[in-house]
Image (cartoon, rainbow, N blue to C red):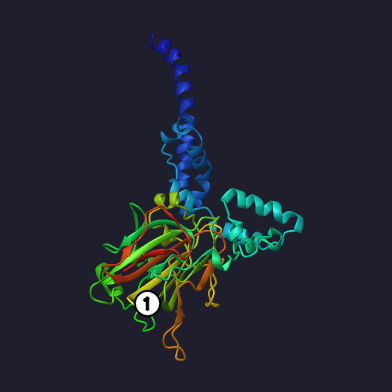
Amino acid sequence: AMCQSEARRGPELRAVKWLQFPQLALRRRLGQLSCMSRPALILRSWPLTVLYYLLPFSVLSPLSRVGWRPVSRVALYKSVPTRLLSRAWGRLNQVELPHWLRRPVYSLYIWTFGVNMKEAAVEDLRHYRNLSEFFRRKLKPQARPVCGLHSVISPSDGKILNFGQVKNCEVEQVKGVTYSLESFLGPRTCTEDLPFPPATSCDSFKNQLVTREGNELYHCVIYLAPGDYHCFHSPTDWTVSHRRHFPGSLMSVNPGMARWIKELFCHNERVVLTGDWKHGFFSLTAVGATNVGSIRIYFDRDLHTNSPRYSKGSYNDFSFVTHANKEGVPMRKGEHLGEFNLGSTIVLIFEAPKDFNFQLKAGQKIRFGEPLGSL
């Protein structure tokens, strides 16, 4: 009887072993993956992760039973070689288009992103030899009148993502998602040329930026979409004394991505200009993005962005204060300051009296020259 029961169970045992074989093989493969370095692990698990997020969840559910876990969406996105893609896009933008191709290519871009070419200094599309020239087109002088009644104007066209007082050394990139003020501006040093002295804590970092009693620290975030005017201007009368360049990632900075990735602006490549205005500390930061590795500051010929190699967390300082120039670079309100190659983000962080009021709404569209706030 025992022999007959074992004989009957034979096929069942073989079936169980056959079903277990793929699981054992997968466990061995996953064990090999766990011994890899993090970059190699992400690279090897990419195909399964992409399928996991594209296909219905039930399709790859058997993998979860053998210990496989997908790479998070954020980690997957961060592993995309955005700097390489941005440099390739920059090369493509420099390619001169034949005359017959310029009008259809630019017309498609205008239709896609809603560009108003009536404001352009040169409306003839055949005038722009390549995409780069078209992105950096100038406007007619009367297209953007500069408001003279308010102390701070918008430095660019764009969309207001967030604004207000800086609290607890945290700044909101979009509502509910913050980043560290110190991580964004970078650590302070003892160099006399820098507009802020060293500090040892979060509170002292903010307090040292506020140089005058009774003042507060304010911020404003402006997102430039691909269809917006890509140059940016001085938002007020101020003196630029220092530039700090952070090489970094070039992830998208559109509002949806800003809600998704915490401290996005601290990860991305950016150029921080700091100095003083009539109420104390003032800074303007140009944040790079995917396909926007090129950030240009007109008076800074030593600035080179989106270089092929960089050290994570590194930054380069440059002082505009010299023995010949004791103050720095004076900028008038509305004066041309720099440009992006596509769309990106401008972040203003500045000191002002407590009665400074923003005249904005989160999410509103704004154009260069329109008021941000005043006393």
Residue shown at 50%/52% (left/top)? 40
Mark 1, residue position: 277
Name the spot of residue 181 as percent of width and height, x first: 34, 65
Q: Considering the image in quadrants, where does the C terminus appear?
A: bottom left
In the depicted structure, whether residue 229 falls above or below residue 332: above
Report the front residue among 142 and 367: 142
Name the spot of residue 86 as percent of width and height, x first: 57, 59
In the depicted structure, whether residue 240 falls above or below residue 28: below
Left or right: residue 347 compared with residue 95:
left
The reply to whether residue 319 is in sight is no
Report the front residue among 295 and 369: 369
Report the front residue among 185 and 275: 275
Quarter of the figure with residue 321: bottom left
Left or right: residue 360 compared with residue 320:
left
What residue type is disc 1 on? Trp
Name the spot of residue 268 as percent of width and height, x first: 46, 61
Left or right: residue 60 compared with residue 279:
right
The reply to whether residue 86 is in sight is yes
Report the front residue among 232 and 61: 232
